[in-house]
């Protein structure tokens, strides 16, 4: 049996193909929702499924925002745009992100964020502690006067798990775990200007959820919904837009009740604390018999 399941490699190949299409497609005037639907259609056309709802992060919005039906927001010439998405093939997850801008003010920030990702890839290998990868990401950002987001990290992935245990920080942290042969993991530098706070906080909006536990509530509509999502997603994240028919226009109340019962977990939208723009680039990597492989 191969150390890295073939499904990871297939998922990574599809993710890479869609990633290239996203970089070509994003343009001023395109709707946030249109961008999400484009990503999801590209994934489906290749016989795979989203590992989590496509995230659209514009300017200071950094992670966990998935546009819903009726969202009329469009990309502007002045925006810094992040598209974060993943693919799963039979539950095997790969994760990637790109940043795009048409605003020259952000060109260096994007360039250095991508450089930081490449430095991280060059550092990652068997037995390296993940904090050492964070040190190199932070060092590359600081060389150009930028900060990394201190409370967002990369992460290992596994079957039906987007975050599988090990974290890859964006600054040096001592005592972190080492990478091992067989690990599959996403590295994702988040960079922001030097004047920024350098950390994210929760916004009041939540558009991404996952099943946290399966037990009967005795309330038919709640139990039917949990069963329906579990059938589709297991523990992988979902967004209300995907279940509009089942939620019947009352997603806030139904999901709120499930969150209160700890059957569903919500992931609030994350924004840079001081309102500064954030750039992100991400690849999923694996350590196989021959060494490091960039899957995406």
Image (tube, helix red, strand yellow):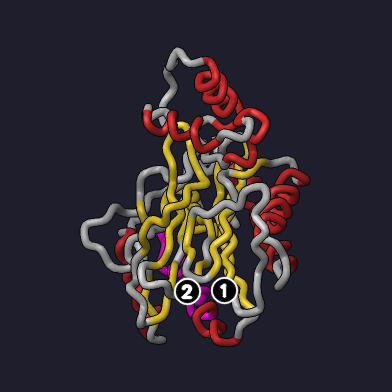
Q: Residue 48's x, y, as percent?
A: 69, 41
Q: Residue at x 35, y 74 (%)?
A: 138
Q: Residue at x 55, y 20 (%)?
A: 221
Q: Is residue 73 visible?
A: yes
In the image, residue 34 lies at what x, y percent? 72, 56
Q: Residue at x 36, y 44 (%)?
A: 165
129 relative position to 72: left or right: left
Counting residues from the N terminus, which is met first, the one under dot 2 or under dot 1? Answer: 1
**Does 89 sit left or right of 208 as displayed?**
right
Q: Which mark is residue 80?
A: 1
Q: Residues within 10 Å of mark 2 (few under 14, many from 20)?
A: many
The magenta stretch is: 111-126
Any part of residue 17 in sight: no
Q: Quadrant of residue 98?
A: bottom right
Between marks 2 and 1, how big is the CA–CA gap?
7 Å
For residue 175, side relative to residue 106 (left or right):
left
Q: Residue at x 65, y 69 (%)?
A: 75
Of residues 204 and 121, the one drawn nearer to the viewer in this rendering: 204
Examine the rendered structure and indicate whether residue 146 appears above or below residue 222: below
Residue 169 lies in what quarter of the image?
A: bottom left
Q: Which residue is mark 2?
A: 277
Residue 112, magenta (yes or no): yes
Q: Position of residue 244 (x, y in %)?
A: 65, 35
Residue at the right extreme of this rendering: 45
Tell me if residue 251 is in the magenta stretch: no
Q: Main secondary structure of the magenta part?
A: helix
SS for callout 2: loop
For the residues bearing labels 2 and 1, Cβ distance under 8 angstroms: yes
């Amino acid at each position: 049996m191969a150390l890295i399941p073939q499904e990871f490699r297939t998922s990574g190949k599809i993710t890479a193909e869609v990633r290239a299409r996203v970089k070509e497609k994003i343009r001023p005037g395109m709707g946030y929702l249109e961008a999400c639907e484009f990503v999801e259609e590209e994934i489906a056309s290749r016989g795979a499924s989203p590992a989590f709802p496509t995230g659209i992060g514009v300017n200071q919005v950094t992670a966990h925002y998935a546009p819903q039906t009726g969202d009329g927001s469009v990309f502007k010439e002045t925006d810094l745009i992040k598209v974060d998405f993943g693919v799963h093939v039979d539950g095997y997850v790969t994760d990637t992100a790109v940043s795009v801008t048409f605003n020259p003010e952000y060109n260096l920030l994007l360039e250095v964020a991508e450089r930081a990702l490449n430095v991280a890839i060059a550092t990652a290998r068997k037995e390296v502690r993940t904090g050492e990868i964070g040190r190199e990401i932070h060092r590359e950002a600081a060389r150009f006067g930028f900060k990394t987001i201190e409370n967002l990290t990369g992460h290992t992935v596994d079957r039906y798990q987007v975050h599988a245990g090990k974290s890859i920080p964006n600054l040096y942290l001592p005592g972190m775990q080492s990478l091992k042969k067989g690990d599959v993991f996403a590295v994702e530098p988040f960079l922001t200007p030097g004047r920024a706070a350098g950390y994210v906080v929760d916004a009041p909006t939540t558009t991404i959820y996952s099943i946290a536990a399966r037990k009967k509530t005795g309330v038919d509509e709640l139990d039917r919904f949990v069963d329906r999502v579990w059938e589709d997603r297991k523990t992988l994240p979902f967004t209300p837009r995907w279940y509009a028919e089942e939620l019947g226009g009352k997603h806030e109340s139904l999901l709120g009740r499930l969150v209160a019962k700890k059957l569903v977990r919500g992931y609030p939208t994350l924004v840079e604390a001081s309102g500064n723009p954030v750039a992100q680039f991400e690849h999923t990597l694996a350590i196989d018999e021959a060494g490091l492989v960039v899957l995406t």
